[in-house]
Image (tube, helix red, strand yellow):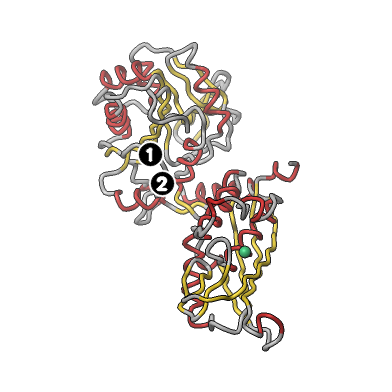
Amino acid sequence: MANPTAEPACIALIVAAGRGTRLGGPVPKQYRDLGGAPVLRRTLEIFASHPRIDAIRVVTGADDETHYSAATAGLALLPPVVGGATRQASVLNGLESLAAMPPAKVLIHDAARPFATADLIDDLIAALDDAPGAIAAVPVVDTLWRAADGNLDALVPREHLWRAQTPQAFRYADILAAHRKAAGQALTDDAAVLRAAGGIVAVVEASEANFKITTEVDLMRASVQRQSAQADLRVGTGFDVHRLGPGDGVWLCGVKLPFDQALVGHSDADVAIHALVDAILGALGDGDIGSHFPPSDMRWRGAASSQFLRHAKSLVAARGGAIRHVDVTIVCERPKIGPHRAALRTSLAQLLELPEGRVSVKATTTEGLGFTGRGEGIAAQAAATIALPFESSFT
Ligand code: MG
């Protein structure tokens, strides 16, 4: 996002107030899981990483506070506003909430469309130079028939027919005025609201991939579409050693285990995380821990290695990818890792925001042989599997 403290030029208003009754279940569809994160978060990530979106506000359901907080943790968003009884009322609430800091432009988007592209957002914003409104839409390609009493009645010419999607982009003052005027009516989208007030709405051709999750089948399609978009699977490995010295505990996987010694190093010497960071960087083909966090840099003196791991994770995310699985092996005689193994795994899973089933922590000894056998140090090796968008295989 651009600087959120400057006067906003363009705000994204994400409508997440629906109950998603067609999908059933206790969780509204925008909070259902899509590849390890809620659908809403997937949608928000698109807008949060777009350079022309200055701020994001979500319109939520009245009872969705817990779901919302969990789905948006760590994202920089404006405080949410609660929606109304209908989608139209929800959008009006959202627009009114921006009146105190009116943006020049607003993009209104359904939370349940997690595949809007950055290019589409650019095209919609650009279209507002020539019209007060612009919508994403796809041309109708199927033959259209009107039916009556179970039989075909009349062919409907499909030329000039478009199926409306979101985002729908508007000059803020125009859409706010139109929505105020249309309050209480039942118009099916915001383009209809602007047109009812006499505003011109441009069509920006979008992709079928920008579909809305409505049914259980849609959710499966979204999952497959997301997976196939990240089909470049890579495995990286890492290895690290730190010497044992005076101290009262060793840091492993972000947890300090009580011990009569400590690992010696420039940072907190968390040998397991160091090996894992190198594995992730290896999968990215992006140098090693020393090149990203040079020991000569005073910023990293005594640093928690969890910072390094978060940074490595963010490098994967910046490439549009995801960490799928990690496997860490700690090699030492003492301290005994077995009793702490579950805690170490939980810690890594939390740092990586992965389910524990995608995180493995193992331990072994070297049968008293070598430097680990003599208790001079601890070694760790790691493997990380990451998935990147296919384009990355050409870069
Ligand atoms: Mg190290």
Which of 211/123 is in front?
A: 123
Where 247 sits versus 202, above or below?
below
Which quadrant of the figure shows ligand 1? bottom right
* Image point (34%, 50%), residue name: 69
Residue at the left extreme, as displayed: 184
Query: Marks 2 and 1: in contact by CB < 8 Å?
Result: no
Q: Which kind of residue does numbered mark 1 sit on?
A: Leu
Real-space CA distance between mark 1 and mark 2, rounded to the nearest whole angstrom? 17 Å
- Cβ at disc 2 under 8 Å from ligand 1: no
Instruction: Give percent across and percent down for residue 41.
Output: 45, 46
Mark 1 neighbour density, 10 Å: few (under 14) some (14–19) many (20 or more): some
Q: Which of the labelled discs sits on residue 77, or is there none? A: 1
Mark 2 neighbour density, 10 Å: few (under 14) some (14–19) many (20 or more): many
SS category of the residue bearing label 2: helix
Q: Which residue is mark 2?
A: 30
Q: Which of the labelled discs sits on residue 156, or is there none? A: none
Instruction: Give percent across and percent down for residue 347.
Output: 47, 66
* Image point (44%, 41%), residue name: 112
Q: Which kind of residue does numbered mark 2 sit on?
A: Gln
SS category of the residue bearing label 1: loop
Quadrant of the rendering where the C terminus is positioned: top right
* Image point (45%, 16%), residue name: 201
* Image point (53%, 39%), residue name: 115
